[in-house]
Amino acid sequence: MIKKTVGGNREVDILKAAIYSYINTAKPIASQKLVKTYKLNISSATVRNILVKLEKQGYLTQPHTSAGRIPTDKGYRFYVNFLLKTELLTNEEKNFIDDAYSSVNYDIESIIEETTKLLSLITSYMGFAELPRFHDSGTFKHLELIVLQGHRIMIIIIMRSGDMKKKVVCFRDEVSSADLQRICAFLNENLEGLDFTHIRSDFREIFKEKYSYLDETVYSCVIVILDVILSFEEEKKVFIDGYEYLMQYPEFSDINKAQAMFRALNTGYLSRILNMPIDSNKGIKVLIGRETADSDIEDCSLLTIRYSLFGSPMGSLGIIGPRRMTYSRVISKLNYTAAKLSDIMTKLLLE
């Protein structure tokens, strides 16, 4: 087992150099190349013996007997946990991120969509970001009902933040315009200003003394609409951008593997990952290779971080790239972007 400290430990220094080399070149590296590139003050024979030892310990692997060695998931994990030093962003990089948000339309969906594009642009990997969960970010402002054909009604829920949810439902009975107005007025009067956690947990208490004033038709419609409102809590929408960036890396040159990876990312995989707790001391969760728990994505690493409102998590954003990604740069950019997004969301929801 490699010691967790770098100072004076040759094995750690050699592992660090091998990982740096593979991140930058995507090519296996041999002992002579390591000595020459990183100006190591030891012989190539000594380095070769250390590489063999690191391979036996599971930190490196040799893809071909005549080739050099490359990091394994275990090697990357050791690097991320114990060797990584986050690089500070330059003022130019910070200004670029700030400027990207300056021209965004101030509605939540536009901001989140722009965030995914920004993440992929500043990292050259794939970016993703989720819309805030409705109950976490939302305070009810207004309800509208629009008659479509037959018994079909479009329900529009508007939040104080400007966020909006729509859903078409079919009422059991035909409802008159007068009844729709009564339903709107009833719900708007009793729900305005409530957050969705409150509505979900206390809606029976909110309405228990008021249901008796509703006739059967209106009552049944109110129940349907409440079910729709509460169902929004479970919805999660994730934006993804930057597929084209991944295609430039040799890891994804196999079109069949690339297509399988893209299919996996579009079938709810990210939603499941975003439900996982973030327990890193950097506030960023890092999944490397097989840690992603999906064979179609095991050539990738995935980093996620939460953005927040007044210290409470609203949603997550992140990056997907090859396992040999530049973790130190990506982490600093994710941290800054998440802080910027949190600030923008706070200002938006206070307006």
Image: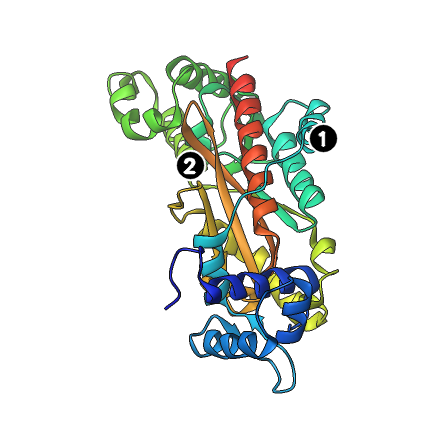
Between 312 and 151, the one nearer to me in the picture: 312
Give residue 314's position: percent from left, percent from top: 46, 32
In which quadrant will I find the N terminus? bottom left
The disc labelled 2 sits on which kind of residue?
Answer: Glu
The residue carrying mark 1 is: 92
In front: label 2 or label 1: 1
Q: Residues within 10 Å of mark 2 (few under 14, many from 20)?
A: some
The disc labelled 1 sits on which kind of residue?
Answer: Glu
Residue 60 in view here:
yes
On screen, residue 223 above or below 65: above
On screen, residue 194 above or below 258: above
Give residue 186's position: percent from left, percent from top: 40, 16
Q: Are dots 2 and 1 in contact, CB under 8 Å? A: no
Give residue 95's position: percent from left, percent from top: 70, 27
Residue 254: quadrant of the picture: bottom right
What is the residue that sits farthest to the bottom in this orientation? 65
Residue 144: quadrant of the picture: top right
Between 118 and 104, the one nearer to me in the picture: 118
Say which element carries label 1: helix
Q: Tell whether 215 sits left or right of 104.
A: left
Label annotation for residue 233: 2
